[in-house]
């Protein structure tokens, strides 16, 4: 069955309107009624999920409906929906994951005094992300892109009385804004080159303009590179990656959403949306491939030493996003978006099950969780292990199929850059398997307590509620099912997944097997030998500190900005202001000086007059 | 509409604050505040009627009302409103009304305060609505001069110094303006003060290039033009709440309005020649204001320097001399006016209770005073140029135009967005969020009556953010100065 265009458009508008209304009503009217707010937001989330799923399943040809939002001179700035395979897939991912996270949150946030605000913000987040996914227009895309960032800011900083949450929220907002500045310039350049704000039309025109030599390939490269900087910021790729691990200061359901279907996924989706542009910019593509593959490896390494379970998953997100982007940069639209889809499911699952453990045992420390008996939470652990298997890329699980698709897509690209990228990705996959195995073993086979217990488990935790368990179970099933969704995604996007040749798959599978084997060796045995990285303390220290990237940024960029602010503040208070004051004082002094002449003493006046007269007489005398 | 056309709406709009001044001087003490509230509401109603009655499809000057004033010098009271004047009058009326409501608790020399305020507002309306250059300057001075007593008497924090500094700076600007305006009159033939007529006649290119900087700097001082902005943050800080609101919200717009209407309007060639300089100064102001705001510890100084930065965006838009840039600049004047009014009204509310504006002495205001805190956060979001707030579209238009006119300056200006986010998030992080400061536990939140003016301002920011067409319709007829 295929729905007609008006119905689909209406469904898309309903999917957009529901969360916005829920946000407004919950935020304004239901401040003191958290249960009603949660119910309203979940109802809106369910509506949106159903609508986006219907749009995914029951549409055929691409649909674009644009209404004029704003008319400036001769330019129409539109608001509308573009329902093509890419946005339909992304929309459904957003709708389903958000709904599950919302349901889960009724349990996780049950005792939080600010839960009305929490649910309202979840609705805002969904609206922003969906508006971005369905955007047919450059400006609309940018607007919702910014709103996604804004909603993330408020959700990361949800517990705004905690300084670390506020710091993390600020960092996320400002670092992604660095990318946004580049992206805005890129969009304006794209608009200037193509002469239209319509995304699809601008991409078409760009193609023909380039062939007709109306524009140079350098201009296209620059536009693509600027957009890619935006992607780097939003999807937390090196070198703008350091905000994402800190962003876990937000409540765990927020992390689940932020790391899977929204925020960081927006960057990947932007790349997919502008795939045609990137295909016209081979240099940018190669650079993007190398950078993202490098990020994938780097983040996998960093994930391998974390003791905070949310931090492991955060680094793993950066690594996986790098993998998706590498696939897209290699031209594998289906591969990249397939990995986006599977990752959205299994990463949400991993965070939600981690959240259930944190909720229960009151600690985020992997070792403490294991010792506290995490393995006894059977359903949660089942979800966590299924997600972990998918993340590790164990054959038969969702992540395996999509990761192999990405690896093959990269492998199929000729050239040294792609070969290097492939190697980086394969090594990254090996370390991914290693840290996943490490997490699993630390939780399942607790080690003896260390002399300095890091964070003692909280005795007042609650076991997961039904709502939480239901969400975890549903995501587990979705994750299992997605292993077989590859061909569906490929046929939806009209680009078959690359043929999985054994020769390409061997390095990937071997790396995963090796990584798992080392994890078993390190953590699976009763042994006192230190694990892999701890044997090289220097490297271990480097990894724990994220190669000092954060510290360097703090010193170099933040330091430079502060220095600049200090210098200008000095200029203001010590130069400009005193100059103005000095001018005023000079005027005053001149006034006082001349006033002194007006002393009112007759003798003085006569004396001055006589002196002047004498001067005049002398001058006249000499003149003759 | 036809019924409306019969009413001389512009003279009424101008007469309302003047009548308010005169009546305030004579009515009994207890009636002063109700009188001012009523008449400022009437002014707001008239400004709204003006905006609704304005025919945006034809554009141009409408509601003309011409009477001779000083016939010997061909000076006329020539009132007329184009879309820009309508939008600016609406801004003035909104800030007048909401500002009056925020001063409800004033009890020191109430009579003189409100008399001066309405006189100031009268001058501002006169500037926006005058087509006669002499009247324009006359009203300009009427608007500027009450600032001195308003700050010196009712102000705080080095008020005498701030009032004098402000007055000297602005008088310096006037000293540049007045001879230039007379030069325009004389060189324009000596038989008309009409701005559109002078613009139509045109001036010799060399005259334009010579006179333009005088006019630009003269008006630019009031617009907070870097590096002659020094009066503005100090003045903002020292002024009482509603004066800060009018001052940053409306008065600075007079400078930008003067640049647009008089300097660029009459001397387009001069504007074109000097545009690179103007754009460079504007960009410097954007960055400079943002960086200096980042270092401030006083709420009002942060907002004061943010005004320098945001007015830089206005001046950058004007300097592009393009249609989109000018539209963006005018829209930004409106958006920034409402936004700073909201900022100052909320800060003033807190300050009235604690007499302390040091950011570090606060924490968790969003918890302690949720309504006031939320309103402050909304203003900050607008300041950061977040979509959904009025300044987003305004800044977007300016940035697009600037990127086309001067790519490098445009990129620098856009990069300023990062610093803007940094200094506003710093204030939010320190004072609004974070652990609540127990010393401030006794803070009272806005009561509904007190919240009303602030909610109006915040509502306008969102209204014009979601439906920017409301403003852009009014100013759609702005054309490019340089094709």
Image (spheres, coloured by chain):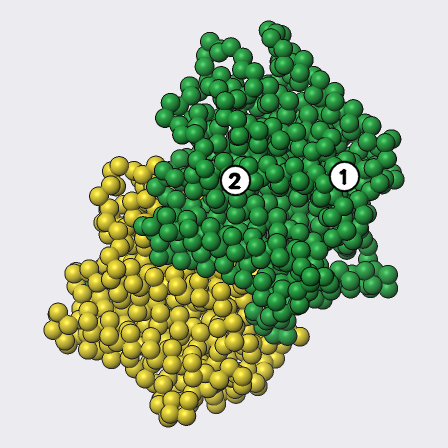
Chain colours: A green, B yellow
- Looking at this view, is A424 or B264 the one in front? A424
Q: Position of A464 compared to B118: left or right?
A: right
Residue that badge 2 annotates: A471
Q: CA distance from mark 1 to mark 2?
A: 28 Å
Seen as rendered, the residue at the extreme front is: A1
| Chain hosting mark 2 | A
Q: Position of B274 compared to B118: left or right?
A: right
Q: Is residue B346 above or below residue A196?
A: above
In front of the other: label 1 or label 2? 2
Residue that badge 1 annotates: A406
Residue B166: assigned label: none
Q: Within 10 Å of the Cα at label 2, are there few (<14), some (14-19), or many (20+) other Cα atoms?
A: many
Q: Is residue B455 above or below residue A234?
A: below
Tell me if I can see residue B296 in this picture: no
The residue depicted at 51 percent of the width and 50 percent of the height is A125
Q: Is residue A258 above or below residue A305?
A: below
Looking at marks 1 and 2 on the same chain, the residue that comes earlier in the sequence is marked by 1
- Looking at this view, is B259 or A449 the one in front? A449
Quadrant for the N terminus of chain A in the image = bottom right
Q: Which element type, helix, strand or loop, lies under badge 2?
A: helix
Expressed as whole percent of the image width and height from the top left, the position of residue B91 reads: 40, 70
Q: Which element type, helix, strand or loop, lies under badge 1?
A: helix
Expressed as whole percent of the image width and height from the top left, the position of residue A373 reads: 48, 19
- Looking at this view, is B53 or B259 the one in front? B53
Corner quadrant of residue A604? bottom left
């Amino acid at each position: 069955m295929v729905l007609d265009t008006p119905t689909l458009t209406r469904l898309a508008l309903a999917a957009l309107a529901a969360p916005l209304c829920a946000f407004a009503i919950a935020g304004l009217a239901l401040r003191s009624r958290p249960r009603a707010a949660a119910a309203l937001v979940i109802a809106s989330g369910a509506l949106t999920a159903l609508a986006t799923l219907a749009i995914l399943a029951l549409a055929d040809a691409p649909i674009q409906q644009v209404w004029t939002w704003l008319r400036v001179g001769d330019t129409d700035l539109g608001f509308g929906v573009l329902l093509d395979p890419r946005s339909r897939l992304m929309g459904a991912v957003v709708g389903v994951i958000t709904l599950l996270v919302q349901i889960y949150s009724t349990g996780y946030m049950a005792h939080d005094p600010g839960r009305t605000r929490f649910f309202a913000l979840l609705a805002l987040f969904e609206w922003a992300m969906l508006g971005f996914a369905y955007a047919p227009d450059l400006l609309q895309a940018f607007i919702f892109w910014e709103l996604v960032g804004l909603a993330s800011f408020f959700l990361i900083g949800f517990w705004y009385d905690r300084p670390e949450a506020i710091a993390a929220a600020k960092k996320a907002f400002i670092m992604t804004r660095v990318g946004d500045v580049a992206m805005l310039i890129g969009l304006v350049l794209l608009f200037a080159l193509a002469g239209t704000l319509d995304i699809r039309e601008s991409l078409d025109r760009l193609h023909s303009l380039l062939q007709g030599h109306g524009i140079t390939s350098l201009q296209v490269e620059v536009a693509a590179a600027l957009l890619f900087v935006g992607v780097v910021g939003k999807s937390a790729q090196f070198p703008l990656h350091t905000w994402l691990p800190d962003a876990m200061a937000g409540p765990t359901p927020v992390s689940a959403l932020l790391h899977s279907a929204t925020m960081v996924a927006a960057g990947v989706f932007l790349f997919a949306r502008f795939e045609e542009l990137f295909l016209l910019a081979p240099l940018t593509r190669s650079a993007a491939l190398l950078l993202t593959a490098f990020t994938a490896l780097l983040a996998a390494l960093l994930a391998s030493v974390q003791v905070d379970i949310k931090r492991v998953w955060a680094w793993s997100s950066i690594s996986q996003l790098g993998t998706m982007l590498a696939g897209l940069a290699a031209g594998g639209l289906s591969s990249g978006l397939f990995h986006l889809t599977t990752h959205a499911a299994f990463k949400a699952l991993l965070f939600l099950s981690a959240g259930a453990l944190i909720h229960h045992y009151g600690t985020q420390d992997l070792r403490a969780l294991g010792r506290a008996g995490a393995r006894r939470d059977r359903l949660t652990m089942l979800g966590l292990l299924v997600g972990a298997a998918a993340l590790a890329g164990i054959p038969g699980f969702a992540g395996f199929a999509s990761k192999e698709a990405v690896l093959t897509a990269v492998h199929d690209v000729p050239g040294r850059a792609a070969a290097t990228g492939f190697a980086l990705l394969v090594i990254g996959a090996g370390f991914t398997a290693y840290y996943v195995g490490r997490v699993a073993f630390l939780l399942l086979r607790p080690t003896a307590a260390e002399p300095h217990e890091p964070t003692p488990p909280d005795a007042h935790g609650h076991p997961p509620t039904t709502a939480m368990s239901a969400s975890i179970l549903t995501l587990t099933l979705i994750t299992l099912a997605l292993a077989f969704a590859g061909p569906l995604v490929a046929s939806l996007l009209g680009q078959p997944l690359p043929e999985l040749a054994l020769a390409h798959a061997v390095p990937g599978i071997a790396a995963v097997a090796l990584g798992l084997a080392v994890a078993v060796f390190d953590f699976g045995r009763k042994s006192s030998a230190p694990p892999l990285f701890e044997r090289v303390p220097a490297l271990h220290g480097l990894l724990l500190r994220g190669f000092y990237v954060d510290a360097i940024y703090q010193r170099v960029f933040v330091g430079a900005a502060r220095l600049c602010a200090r210098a200008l503040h000095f200029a203001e208070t010590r130069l400009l202001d005193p100059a103005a004051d000095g001018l005023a004082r000079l005027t005053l002094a001149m006034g006082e000086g001349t006033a002194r002449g007006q002393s009112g003493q007759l003798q003085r006046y006569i004396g001055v007059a006589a002196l002047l007269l004498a001067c005049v007489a002398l001058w006249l005398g000499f003149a003759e | 509409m036809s019924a409306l056309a019969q009413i001389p709406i512009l003279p009424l709009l101008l007469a309302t604050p003047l009548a308010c001044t005169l009546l305030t001087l004579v009515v009994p003490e207890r009636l002063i505040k109700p009188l001012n509230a009523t008449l400022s509401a009437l002014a707001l109603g008239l400004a709204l009627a003006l905006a609704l009655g304005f025919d945006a499809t034809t554009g141009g000057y409408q509601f003309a009302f011409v009477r001779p004033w000083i016939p010997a010098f061909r000076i006329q009271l020539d009132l007329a409103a184009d879309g820009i004047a309508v939008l600016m009058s609406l801004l003035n009326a909104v800030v007048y009304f909401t500002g009056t409501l925020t001063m409800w608790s004033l009890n020191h020399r109430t009579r003189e305060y409100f008399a001066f305020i309405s006189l100031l507002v009268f001058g501002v309306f006169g500037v926006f609505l005058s087509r006669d250059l002499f009247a324009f300057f006359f009203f300009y001075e009427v608007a500027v001069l009450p600032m001195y007593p308003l700050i010196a008497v009712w102000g705080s924090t080095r008020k005498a110094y701030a009032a004098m500094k402000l007055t000297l700076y602005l008088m310096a600007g006037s000293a540049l303006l007045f001879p230039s305006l007379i030069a325009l009159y004389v060189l324009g033939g000596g038989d008309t003060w009409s701005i559109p007529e002078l613009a139509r006649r045109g001036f010799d290119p060399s005259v334009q290039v010579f006179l333009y900087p005088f006019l630009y700097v003269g008006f630019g001082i009031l617009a907070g033009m870097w590096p002659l902005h020094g009066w503005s943050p100090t003045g903002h800080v020292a002024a009482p709440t509603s004066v800060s609101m009018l001052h940053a919200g409306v008065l600075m717009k007079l400078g930008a309005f003067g640049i647009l209407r008089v300097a660029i309007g009459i001397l387009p060639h001069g504007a074109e020649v000097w545009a690179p300089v103007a754009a460079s100064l504007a960009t410097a102001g954007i960055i400079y204001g943002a960086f200096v705001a980042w270092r401030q510890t006083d709420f009002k100084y942060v907002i004061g320097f943010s005004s320098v930065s945001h007015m830089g965006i206005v001046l950058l838009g004007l300097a592009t001399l393009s249609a989109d840039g000018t539209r963006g600049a005018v829209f930004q004047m409106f958006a920034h006016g409402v936004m700073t009014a909201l900022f100052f009204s909320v800060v003033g509310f807190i300050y009235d209770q604690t007499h302390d504006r040091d950011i570090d002495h606060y924490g968790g205001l969003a918890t302690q005073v949720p309504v006031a805190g939320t309103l402050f956060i909304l203003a900050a979001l607008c300041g950061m140029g977040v979509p959904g707030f009025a300044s987003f579209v305004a800044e977007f238009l300016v940035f697009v135009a600037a990127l086309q006119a001067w790519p490098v300056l445009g990129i620098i200006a856009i990069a300023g967005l990062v610093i803007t986010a940094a200094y506003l998030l710093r204030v939010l992080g320190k004072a609004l969020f974070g652990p609540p400061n127990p010393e401030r536990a006794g803070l009272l939140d806005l009561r509904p009556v007190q919240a009303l003016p602030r909610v109006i301002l915040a509502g306008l920011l969102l209204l014009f953010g979601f439906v920017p067409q409301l403003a852009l319709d009014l100013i759609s007829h702005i054309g490019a100065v340089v094709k």
